[in-house]
Amino acid sequence: MKRIFTLLATCWVMQKAMAAFIPAGTMLYLDASKAWTNETSITARFSSDGMSAQEVAMTRTAGEQHIWQVSAPTPGPWTVVTFQSISGYQTAELIWGGYQSLYVVTCDACGSGQKAAGEWRYFTPLPEQNPGQLGIDYTDSIVCSDLADSTITLSVGTTQDYLYSQWFAFTASAWTRIEGTPERMIASLPADTAQDIWFLFTGLLVKKDGVGVVNGDFEQGNTGFYTDYSYRTPVDDHTLYDEGAYTITNDVRQVHTSAPSPACSHDHTTGSGMMMAVNGGSDVNKTVWQQTVMGLNPQTSYVFSAWVMNWDQENSNMAKLEFSINGQLQGGRVSPQGGYGHWTQVYAVWNSGTSDQANIRLVNFQDASYGNDFAVDDISLSELVTENRLFHFSFKSCDPPLPECTNDLVYRKWNDVLFCDNHDSTLVSWQWYLDSVAIEGATKQFLYMPDGMAPGEYYVIARCVDGQLKVSCPITFEEAPRSAVSSPKIPSHVAKKEPIRIQMNGRSAELNIYDMMGRRRLLTYTRGEDIELPHYLDNGMYIILLQMGNESVAQRIRVW
């Protein structure tokens, strides 16, 4: 679930402020491959305000040469963890990276008693079971023996949907890691055709199911949240002169003279939308923003995110912001970074535990009356689910051997369709391939890819009525635009209170509905399924906007 915006690129810098508490039972991992390779004992020391520190011995992670692991002890949650080796090497005080994380020490030659620097990364250990014991449905591919030791490419989706992902390979009775993303993993088939190979993809998928913060981007105006601050209707550049006041605006410079130039005072979402602009007050007990999200799943992980910005040109008395969920701190105490006009992300993974709701609260602990000016935007809470995909490859002898490829056998019909020529009706069966891997279910005369052609080489093996084979020469796609015929289909009119039916043709998208005044009336997401969208729109004209990565489709619709 990540968005990348190029608008106002000179005015903001993406920076993550990681979570500051570690729930009991959370698995933490330490990569000692650079600094502590000869150690025989490493401990993790957990501490937190008001609790006695606890030291826990770490153990080596199965199948990993230099990775150690530990489970955060009870009671928790802990705010600080420090790793220390038997020789006295230790890390500086850390702020946890969220979920189960790997701390990678970047010190190449740490001396005795020195502190080692490092960074957190999301981490999944090697599977402990053989592929057949994982209980995951798998895709089975049989390839010709002459493809032994050749390179293959696999993909499961788009990187933007995953918070974290990892590929593994299983061959010769052992798991290994493979570099890759959800969009592409490149690996080699075994050189020994008597061996099978398995590939496993595991990732943390951000669900876009509509459950989460209401009006977190403030596009609906001053609604959907509680605050102890005083609302000011935007009138002029003196609107926010009062301490402890806020407004909803698309340009902070229009409500306060101390705001930066217009190019650096817009919202985080699009650069032209709304945000909450705040003149911080000296009372640190007042709630700046609060909302309770209902209907959550207990014992479920959610990713929390918010963006904050300083808009005081003198960068004086920066806000000290704390987001909490059900009383648990999220992202630590954060001040906007990079000077005025720069957006900073507050980001953490939160587990719901036994609760089915999340009370999200923002407090400002800066008590200075001068300066202390900030903006908030894009507050969100999205469910995380673990998704696994398993692929199996085995070899067979291909007889007769494949002939030389033919250049005029296949041609592009559209940007997402390849067509095999059969003008003399001699071909009776087809199998399409991408990068030497059979495409599951692609056994027709044409190849149609609903999401457009992924990068790679495509070809078809066709069988003639007499049993002979024909092979097309590869057609290479880098990044081809989609055909109009496979774009989503939006109706031009719909009766009032009747559902809006949109044919997505397998396309994942963010769906927005705007009225003719430019106000957003609805926001939802689809992962490719067709939409039957209930609505309560009044009679009139509206704009439906579908955002699909770098591509967008907009259409006017009449409700009558």
Image: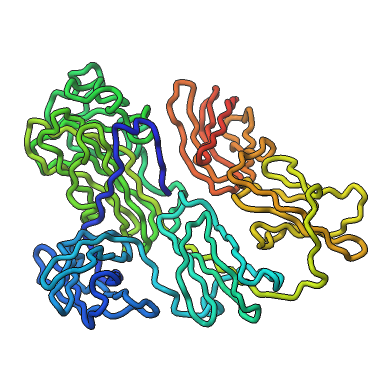
Quadrant of res 490: top right
Seen at 27% across and 74% down, the residue is 71
The residue positioned 73% from the left and 57% from the top of the image is 432
Q: Quadrant of residue 147?
A: bottom right
**Placement of 370 over or under 410, stated as above or below:** above
Where's residue 536, x and y in %? 51, 33
Which residue: 9% across, 65% down?
A: 50
Q: Position of residue 116 (x, y in %)?
A: 18, 65
Q: Nearer the viewer, residue 151 or 160?
A: 151
103 vs 491, nearest the viewer: 103
On screen, residue 77 versus residue 413, left or right, reads: left
Q: Residue at x 27, y 76 (%)?
A: 37
Instruction: Confirm whether residue 10 shows in the render.
Output: yes
Asked which quadrant contains residue 142, the reply is bottom right
Q: Residue furthest top?
A: 236
The total of numbered circles placed on residues is: 0
Residue 502 in view: no
Q: Is residue 327 above or below residue 242?
A: below
- Residue 376 place in picture, x, y as percent: 26, 37
In the figure, is residue 282 to the left or right of 555?
A: left
Of residues 201 and 275, the one nearer the viewer is: 201
Q: Viewer-proximal residue, 459 or 429?
A: 459
Residue 474 image offset from top left, x and y in percent: 70, 53
